[in-house]
Amino acid sequence: MYRTEKISFEDGHEVDIQVYSANSSVTYLFMPALGVRASYYLPFVEALQQESVNTVLMDYRGKGTSSVRASSKVDFGYETLIQDMAKIADHIHEIFPSTNLVVGGHSLGGQVGCLLAARYPEKVVGILKITSCLVYHKGWSGWGNVQVRMAGTLFPLIARIVGHFPGEKVGFGGREGKTLMKDWGHNALTGRYELTGTDFNYESALHNTLKPLLSISLKGDFMASYQAVKNLYEKLHPDSPLTHHHISAEEVGIEKLNHFNWVKKPRYVARLMADWLKETFR
């Protein structure tokens, strides 16, 4: 069971968060993948609650319970998502005083969690990312490398022409802010987080981030290759305590495991995460 709370931002944006309480000393703030509503992950966060982990599930701006949708008049990028997540992190510390807050999520959510930990290290104690990678094309070889470079060039261009990114028509993500796809494309082509709308040096901050991190990747996941997943966490301080599980379809119990369907049978992933959280932050 969970309760829903509405979070309001200074620019008028509102979003609901789902708060799962398990009387734990650890709380996990989870952000979804690009184009995915938070409600898709309900079976997963319920499994985490059963493993005695507090979990807060959030939609990112423009999705699900968010009060805005990307358009030629409504735009947002990575920096906006980081600031949104930071506000929710502050709210979590009010809900669960003295909690050990771990941030991250699935794919895009894991990227934003890493960037939040780099910018506001005082807000969090660790990072937990699932199939979350550096989008940089060198994380793939062969045709995959070409595809990522093409996407990094074309997707921001499409978003700039249309006024937003029509992911539901392109077949990647959903309706996204043009700045979000600009930042995504820059990362795909350069491997660097040089975000629109801020002078903050995320590359330097990431390198200085010394937080325990759990990274989960899936064997055969084209959208987040093993090398691309490594490339993201290797941006952190080399002394950051790291645990990386590269798991198989057999372990999860899904014959054709992919970037998204692990949520359908979440027990194995939830148990891995809960064990790490309890051991690391007890």
Image: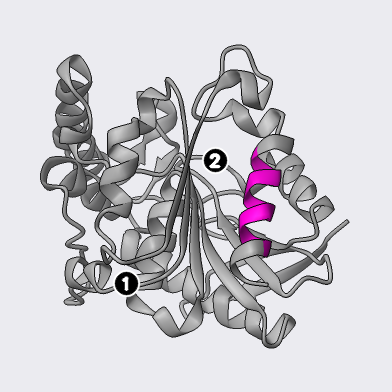
Image position of 125 (left or right of 209):
right
In the rendered view, tell whether residue 84 sits above or below residue 250: below
Q: Which residues are magenta?
A: 269-278
Quadrant (top left, top right, bottom left, bottom right) of the C terminus: bottom right
The answer to which of marks 1 and 2 sits earlier in the sequence is 2
Residue located beneath label 1 in the image: 209
Q: Foreground residue, 272 or 160?
A: 272
Q: Amino acid at mark 2?
A: Val
Where residue 232 appears, as percent x and y from the top left, is 30, 50
Crowding near the residue tagged with mark 2, few <14, some 14–19, many ≥20 C-alpha atoms within 10 Å: some
Q: Is residue 205 visible?
A: yes
Q: Are marks 1 and 2 in contact (CB under 8 Å)?
A: no
Q: How many marks?
A: 2
Whole-angstrom CA distance, mark 1 to mark 2, is 28 Å
Q: Residue at x 32, y 53 (%)?
A: 233
Where residue 154 appears, as percent x and y from the top left, is 17, 32
Q: Foreground residue, 148 or 35?
A: 148
Q: Is residue 134 visible?
A: no
Name the dominant secondary structure of the magenta segment: helix
Image position of 92 (left or right of 43):
left
Q: Foreground residue, 222 or 273?
A: 273
Q: Amino acid at mark 1?
A: Thr
Quadrant (top left, top right, bottom left, bottom right) of the N terminus: bottom right
Q: Which mark is residue 36?
A: 2
Which quadrant of the view contains residue 31? Answer: bottom right
Which quadrant of the view contains residue 118? Answer: bottom left
Where residue 193 appears, as percent x and y from the top left, is 21, 59
Residue placed furthest toward the top: 255
Q: Is residue 198 magenta?
A: no
Q: Residue at x 26, y 55 (%)?
A: 179
